[in-house]
């Protein structure tokens, strides 16, 4: 009976301690995090694992765990780690080699292009090629900027996708309708405009599209923060294993270039 009483008392003490620890954690201020930051999972299935923040959307934080798993969690599930733990340690007695910004920029451009190539695969992007959505386009010779997607279709004969987009680049401020191969798509936005379903005369239609496009591009929020793009993991739900690795590598390179005081 004495042993049972002692065991019960010990269990009670352990429960009280656990409750106190949980209360202290709940009362602690929630830490703030930044994209690209190295963190550690505080709880859950991946407790104790190293992670890197890929994106932050209000309360949802998408992280890459151990360079392999992409998980959406909240701030209380994460904790900051020392900067020295976020990078590979330099061996004692070995002088660290200075990084070349030009080489890093070239690597950054290459990784962004690799990520874009995954994004524009028809199976990945087709569900988001909605009439009225803002898309960023280039042609063989120039940057066309943000435009309004009017239609997207796959050719029966060639099986190639093409998009019809209204754009207004700097050299064509009045705007123009362009038919371009899907490979010319650079970015895809969260923003969708409402276009009339009834066809109008070309001149009248272009004028309406130009007005709509200019309203979006000159919106106060978008001028300050840029036109928001679809999140490849959270919103487009890309399953390619390379996506998380590329996003993390891009964030790391971008952060290192910023820390060096040079433009990415």
Image: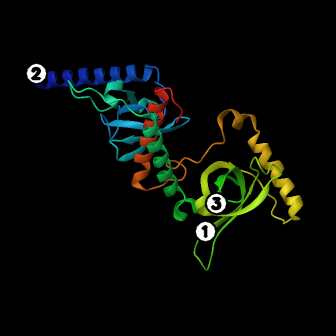
For mark 2, what is the residue? 2
Residue 250 vs residue 7, the one in the foreground: 250
For mark 3, what is the residue? 129
Q: Relative to residue 138, is residue 74 depicted above or below? A: above
Q: Relative to residue 203, is residue 15 depicted above or below? A: above
Q: Earlier in the sequence, mark 2 or mark 1?
A: 2
Q: Which mark is residue 161?
A: 1
The residue at the point 51 percent across, 47 percent down is: 234
> Mark 2, mark 1: which one is toward the viewer?
1
Badge 3: few (under 14), some or many (20 or more) residues near its Cα, within 10 Å? some
The structure's colour scheme is: rainbow
The location of residue 154, given as percent across then percent down, is 62, 71
Q: Earlier in the sequence, mark 2 or mark 3?
A: 2
Left or right of 222 on screen, residue 214? right
The residue at the point 84 percent across, 57 percent down is: 206
Marks 2/3: CA–CA distance: 73 Å
Image quarter where the N terminus lies is top left
Q: Are marks 2 and 1 in contact (CB under 8 Å)?
A: no
Marks 1/3: CA–CA distance: 11 Å
């Amino acid at each position: 009976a004495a042993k049972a009483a002692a065991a019960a008392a010990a269990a009670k003490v352990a429960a009280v301690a656990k409750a106190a620890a949980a209360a202290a954690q709940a009362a602690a201020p929630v830490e703030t995090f930044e994209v690209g930051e190295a963190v550690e999972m505080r709880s859950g299935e991946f407790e104790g694992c190293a992670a890197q923040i890929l994106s932050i959307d209000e309360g949802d934080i998408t992280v890459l765990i151990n360079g392999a798993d992409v998980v959406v969690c909240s701030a209380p599930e994460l904790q900051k780690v020392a900067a020295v733990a976020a990078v590979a340690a330099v061996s004692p007695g070995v002088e660290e080699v200075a990084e070349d910004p030009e080489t890093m920029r070239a690597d950054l451009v290459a990784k962004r292009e690799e990520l874009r190539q995954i994004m524009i695969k028809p199976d990945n992007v087709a569900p988001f090629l909605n009439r009225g959505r803002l898309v960023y386009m280039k042609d063989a010779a120039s940057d066309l900027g943000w435009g309004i997607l009017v239609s997207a279709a796959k050719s029966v004969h060639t099986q190639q996708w093409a998009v019809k987009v209204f754009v207004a680049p700097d050299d064509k401020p009045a705007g123009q309708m362009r038919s371009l191969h899907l490979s010319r798509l650079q970015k895809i936005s969260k923003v969708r405009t409402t276009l009339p379903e009834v066809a109008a005369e070309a001149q009248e239609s272009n004028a309406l599209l130009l007005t709509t496009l200019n309203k979006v591009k000159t919106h106060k929020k978008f001028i300050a923060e840029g036109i928001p793009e679809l999140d490849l993991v959270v919103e487009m739900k890309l399953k390619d294993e390379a996506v998380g690795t590329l996003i993390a590598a891009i964030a790391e390179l971008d952060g290192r270039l910023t820390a060096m005081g040079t433009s990415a």
